[in-house]
Image (tube, coloured by chain):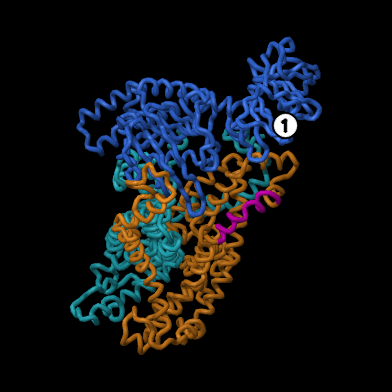
Chain colours: A orange, B blue, C cyan
Amino acid sequence: MANVASINTTAAAFDAVADRVEGPAGPRPRRVLSRRNILLYGTLILVSAYYLLPLYVMIVTSLKGMPEIRIGNVFAPPLEITFEPWVKAWATACTGLNCDGLSRGFWNSVRITVPSVLLSILIASVNGYALANWRFRGSEMFFTILIVGAFIPYQVMIYPIVILLREMGIYGTLTGLVIVHTIFGMPILTLLFRNYFTSVPEELFKAARVDGAGFWGIYFKIMMPMSLPIFVVAIIIQVTGIWNDFLFGVVYTRPESYPMTVQLNNIVNSVQGVKEYNVNMAATLLTGLVPLIVYFLSGKLFVRGIAAGAVKG
Amino acid sequence: MEAVNNSVELRRVSLNFGSVEVLRTLDLDVAEGEFLVLLGPSGCGKSTLLNCVAGLLDVSAGQIFIKGRNVTWEEPKDRGIGMVFQSYALYPQMTVEGNLSFGLKNARLPREEIANRVARAADILQIKPLLQRRPSELSGGQRQRVAIGRALVRDVDVFLFDEPLSNLDAKLRAELRVEIKRLHQQLANTMIYVTHDQIEAMTLADRIAVMRGGVIQQLDRPQNIYNRPVNRFVAGFIGSPGMNFLDGRMEIEGGKPVLRLADCAVPLDRYGFADAPADGRDVVFGIRPEHVSANSGMDWPFSASASVEVVEPMGSDTLVWTRVGGQPLAVRLPTERAPEEGDTISIGFDPMNASIFGTDDDSRL
Amino acid sequence: MSTRSDDRPPFRPFRNLNAKIASVPMILTTMVVFVGGTFWTVLYSFTKSGLLPRLEFVGLAQYERLWGTNRWLIAIENLFIFGICMLVFSMVIGFVLAALLDQKIRFENTFRSIILFPYALSFIVTGLVWQWILNPQFGVQGVVRNLGWTSFTFDPLYNADIVIYGILIAALWQGTGLVMCLMLAGLRGIDEDIWKAARVDGIPAWKTYVFIVIPMMRPVFVTAIVLIASGIVRVYDLVVAQTSGGPGIASEVPAKYVYDMMFSSQNLGQGFAASTMMLLSVAIVIIPWAYLEFGRRRRHG
């Protein structure tokens, strides 16, 4: 224990005035492998292993052939790497009568996600801006209902929406699903934008009004350009949220336009046929790939999105 | 070990964060019962130094002694210190009494002893009526008193204050300043006090250590720091309104040193040079506004007439901006004798009160 | 003309018209979908709706039938066990992980990214992976048996008694990252001087956490509990993917019951009654919280 310390002290002692060099000097002695550090990093490494394990299992299983899966265990690395399960999952896996793989679900999800993200963010950002800077009588009440509404279980509102969409003639269409995503994304996004625009110095807004800019002028020329990071946060929230959705996809679309998650579940949990675990895991990975890429690319912004959802009110 | 006459001693203390040197081989002795103020702009290392004394930061090299005991590796609680923080750092969920006694309970002091100490601290700080309240129910000044109380109950020899008044408004700050001074007189403990406020430093300190860039620039009694700053940084940092700095050139005329400022010459034979003045050296001549007079009746070693450009009344005094040798010069005058803008006045000063710095290293000549 | 002031302006419908136009989607969402839809569902839960909604009131008959249905009772019991365990474990694990990450450690970002990444995944993905890992033949049980411990049994997804814990494992894997993240933000929000003061006072780290830091983090805990709790009531996709409610009906949950009644069994009345019960349980959690949170804020101005 004293060894580490004495190295430090001698270094300091060489040029020290000779009056006091004995006794403790410099930083407290700390061993890299102290019991505390072993416990701390040991726990974190174990925990990390636990969190990474399913990802690892997915990858190795998806690279094995079926015979190897039947004899081996889920944690063993593949003896012989094959990409066939991936090809099959993407192009030929069957759901019911369709045998064109997950690719159909992938493109459906893209067709659902892109317009939903754009529309929901456009509406919610303008709405948050109105709530932050152009309050009118009742605006706070509507906002409160919106936030409280975010806690109502979806199951309560599912059926009335079915009726509404049917009356509008868009039940079962992508348009209908886009509207549903816009509705249910509204509470969190409005909150996000409202809080952000409220934090913008009011003087800026006042100066723009004195300069004669109106509601839309201030939004497009001042607020939007200066809040790009918050738009990115909103995009992250929505892309992952909508891509991962299952319930709305299964309720509001027809089988041929099911999003990827629904199709994945149908492939894996279909009762007929032999279970092809490698194909299932390849399909599962494929479905998780988009949110994972978004997550690892966005880094801190993803965390910021979570924090935004947490700061209610 | 030498005799215990210093309460706190720092021996060649350095601190690096990575490659950034925050404290550079610093030596400091604080006498028993002394009130030492660490003064400097933000980022000068003064709070860091205090945290090192407290043991909240490990030093990279060097030793720290408190009461003659080497505490370099000791935990904060074992160093015999109490500390007061800028943000009060009161435990918000506990009552004032809980805040004062929590540390003592942890040290497993007898209940009676805890009660006595809390009562005594509450008495000294006049917070008895507040004991059952929570920090959120207190004003800023009351919170800071409680924070001081938490240091007080620890019954220690050394108090460390980390900008304790910076979160308070000006009026409260002045009140608590007096109270801290009174506390020091009453307890006669060693106190180390960090601030960036020069008025706090001047009023409270027995000695001030002016810091910049992790180095103590000057360590001296407040009057000496005010009158004989060792360099231009200290001169400019202390005093409000700040010292006038005039660029000039030193010459020897007829064996006597003279400062050349464009068209006028200031005789410097009354200035206490540290070394013999050199002919032809570029210097900065510093003179405080309060050391310049407009009383033409007196016989100043240097006098000139100057026209008044701007007048800033500050209540009892008025700051008058003129020009000498083409360079701006502020003069502090009693308000009743203040001139009007556009007037021409006669100004004079005694170079004995001035500070002259070399332009090469900014240090006092 | 202050637009941010809270005092009520006189009613002038065309003042601030653009803001009102911009708020039309919000007003429609709140009034038609949230308020209207909820009201509609509650109303129709008292009707005899079957394949189609019918306004033929039958009083509390749907509820009586609901509470007499074994499947619903199992769903409620599951939700209860799952909910309590999920709340307790995710809070404890999330906080401990956050406290570990807050020790000024190296590679903090790496560890945080690893613990949080499952939260970015779909419940379907999570459910399917854990279905595979918990597969008795090839998964954990099979591996341990191959190692020689042939009587080892760990097959939660095929054992009706413990299936809900199998789902819990997956839910914790996905959800603790969120709690960890919230708690870490909360810990970072604690004034560093508090820690210094506690060190000067000689208070050990665990005591500082228990008696000072955790009480200071009350709002963060409340937020985390509300978020987790509202997620628990909604749990649906995970069950569908992992067990489809099986074995038998052992892992049914209310959200799945509602869906199946509405869209598979063509028994709308049951679906409405069940979803109204879900709404009620959420309200029991949310209303006291909202009252405390917003009521207090209003009183403090």
Which is nearer the eye, A46 or B74? Answer: B74
Which is nearer the eye, A196 or C292? Answer: A196
Dot 1 lies on which element? strand
The magenta span reads A221-235
Quarter residue C148 falls in: bottom left
Which quarter of the figure is the N terminus of chain C placed in? top right
Most common SS among magenta residues? helix
Image point (67%, 44%), residue name: C17
Question: Residue A175's x, y, as percent?
Answer: 59, 66
Instruction: Check disc 1 and give the amino acid type.
Output: Met
> Dot 1, crowdedness within 10 Å: few (<14), some or many (≥20)?
many
Image point (65%, 33%), residue name: B357
State the residue position of label 1.
Answer: B250
**Would you say residue C283 is visible in this rendering?**
no
Question: Residue A257's x, y, as percent?
Answer: 54, 74
Image point (20%, 32%), residue name: B110
Magenta-span inclusion, residue A40: no
Image point (79%, 30%), residue name: B262
| Total numbered labels placed on residues in the image | 1
Which is nearer the eye, A183 or C53? Answer: A183
Quarter residue B300 falls in: top right
- Subunit of mark 1? B
**Would you say residue B117 is visible in this rendering?**
yes
Residue reaching furthest bottom? A67
